[in-house]
Amino acid sequence: MEDRESPENVVIVCANCAPCPDPQFLDRPLASFVGRHCKLGFPIPQISGQERPTIEHMWVKVTGVQMRGEVEVLVGWLDNDPAYVDLKYQDLIEFRPVEIEAVV
């Protein structure tokens, strides 16, 4: 049985209360994130005439480090069911430490 997050845990918070990237993660070796969960903010496409949050915060299970051109990036699987972003559970995500809001 999968241990997925409950839909009741999805909440909307004001922009001033929402998590934001934390600079403490910038100096860590990328390999130290492998096997951990990183919280990231994903921009939400705006629909004309509808008021929506601007960022959806979700967890990514980091599976490795890869080269993209001359830059190393973290890669992992989305570990949430998005409510607003056009992604799905277990989509492959690439990101940089500058985007990380929290790590568990």
Image (cartoon, helix red, strand yellow):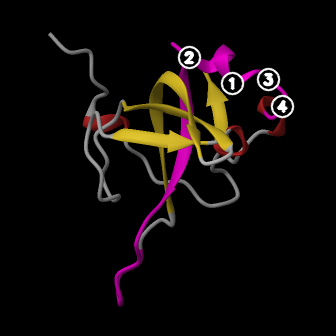
Residue labelled with disc 1: 30
Q: Is residue 104 visible?
A: no
Q: Look at the numbered disc 3 and give the secondary structure of its residue.
A: loop
Judged from the image, the secondary structure of the residue bearing numbered disc 1 is helix
Residue under numbered circle 2: 34
Q: CA distance from mark 2 to mark 4?
A: 17 Å
Pointer 2: residues within 10 angstroms few (<14), some, or many (20+)? some
- Residue 92 counted in the magenta span: no
Place residue 66 in its image quadrant.
top right
Q: Secondary structure at mark 2?
A: loop
Q: Farthest residue toward the front?
A: 69
Residue 46 falls left or right of residue 81: right
Residue denoted by label 4: 24
Q: Tell which of 35 and 6 is nearer to you.
A: 35
Marks 2 and 1: in contact by CB < 8 Å? yes
For image coordinates 20% across by 15% down, the residue present is: 2
Count residues near mark 1 (Cα–Cα under 10 Å), then give few for <14, some for 14-19, many for 20+: some
User: Gap between marks 3 and 2, in whole Å?
Assistant: 12 Å
Span colored in magenta: 26-51
Kindly indicate whether the residue at mark 4 contacts the one at mark 1 (C-beta within 8 angstroms). no
The residue under label 1 is which amino acid type? Leu
